[in-house]
Image (cartoon, rainbow, N blue to C red):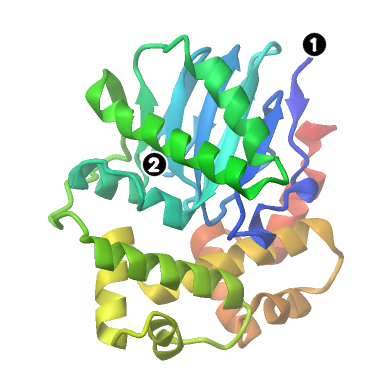
Amino acid sequence: MTKRFWDPCKSTLGEVPQNVVVSRAQPGIMPCAHWHAQVEVNFLAAGSVSYRMHGHTVDLAAGDLALFWGGLPHQLVDASEDAFYVAIHLPLIHFFRLRLPPTLTHKLTHGATLVSAEPDPTDGPNIERWARYMASDCQERREHAIDELLLRIDRMQFEPYRLVEPFGLADGESGPIDMQSLQNIGTICAFISENFREDIDAVDIAGSADIHPKYAMSVFKKSTGMTLNEYVNLLRLSYAQAMLLRDNDNVLRVAMESGFGSLSAFNKSFRKIAGMSPSDFRREARFRPALH
């Protein structure tokens, strides 16, 4: 077995932010960082991998279970030849079904990575089963697998774990979110996922949950660390990323199709997350010499 390189042109994550996406594969070394609007769960069944995250690096070994927020740029930079993992990408709403301590939740939404510290022999067969169920045509099986996965992640707080944090990350001051607020967040996330390519604002988003715009902005910021506008932009940028890698459309068309009202707004937002222009990102991801 030889090392595998990730083909960014085949990624669909940016186009389906409302879906659970599961990958069972030899991890592919990434030519550049990418991002998506899902929380990512990695279980390393064999070998080892190294990630360059937003402000830190994470090394995973066989048996490790890891959780991180995919909305910040991250890049798999190395993998052993025998590496094999299951990567499960969960829509943001499922993250807020977790019952993790508020400080831990805050750190995860701001870029920290949660990793199990001791291998659990039941993780391998369980995660394989969950992956099969999540790929099933049966909605009940899919929901059952998600519920069990969330319970497994919840259990990590009661067992030895390590939290790999960006430098200077402070504890959050917000308290736990009540059930009604969680329901509102779910409605908000669903509405944004279905409509982010349209011209929507805080009034439209709050209206989907039948709440006041100021309350919608407050509860979403408290829960996610992002403003509503930042989350809408994240989904638009994820979609634009997929278009840049998959198609040959000019940057203006990518901007318009992704929901940005102008090329200048798109370029500014894209540079903020990627550190380069959309054209340079496309060139770097597609033609980096290290892949050939």
The three-letter amino acid code for the residue at tag 1 is: Met
Relative placement, left or right, of 91 versus 280 is left
Residue 29 seen: no
Residue at the (62%, 24%) spot, across then down: 128
Instruction: Report which quarter residue 18 is drawn in.
Output: bottom right
Work out which quarter of the rendered image holds the C terminus and state it: top right
Mark 1 or 2: the one toward you: 1
The residue lying at 63 percent from left, 40 percent from top is 134
Quadrant housing the N terminus: top right
> Residue sitting at 74 percent across and 57 percent down?
282
Residue 78 screen position, x and y as percent: 61, 24
Residue 63 drawn above or below residue 206: above
Residue at numbered disc 2: 55
Instruction: Please tell me whether mark 2 sits on a helix, a strand or a loop.
Output: loop
Percent across and percent down for residue 233 are 51, 71
Give the distance between the C-alpha atoms of the residues marked 1 and 2, in whole angstroms: 31 Å
- Is residue 13 something one can see in this rendering? yes
Element carrying mark 1: loop
Residue 95 vertical position relative to residue 146 in the rendered view, above or below: below
Q: From the viewer's perspective, is 218 left or right of 248?
A: left
Front residue (pair 254, 224): 224
Query: Residue drawn 53% across and 30% down?
Result: 42
Amino acid type of the residue that numbered disc 2 sits on in the rendered structure: Gly
In contact (CB < 8 Å): disc 1 and disc 2: no
Please provide percent x and percent y for residue 250. Answer: 81, 74
Quarter residue 76 falls in: top right
Q: Residue at label 1? A: 1
Spot occupied by residue 207 in the image (x, y as percentages of width and height): 41, 87
User: How dense is the environment of label 2, judged by Cα within 10 Å: few (below 14), some, or many (20 and up)?
Assistant: some
The tag earlier along the polypeptide, 1 or 2, is 1
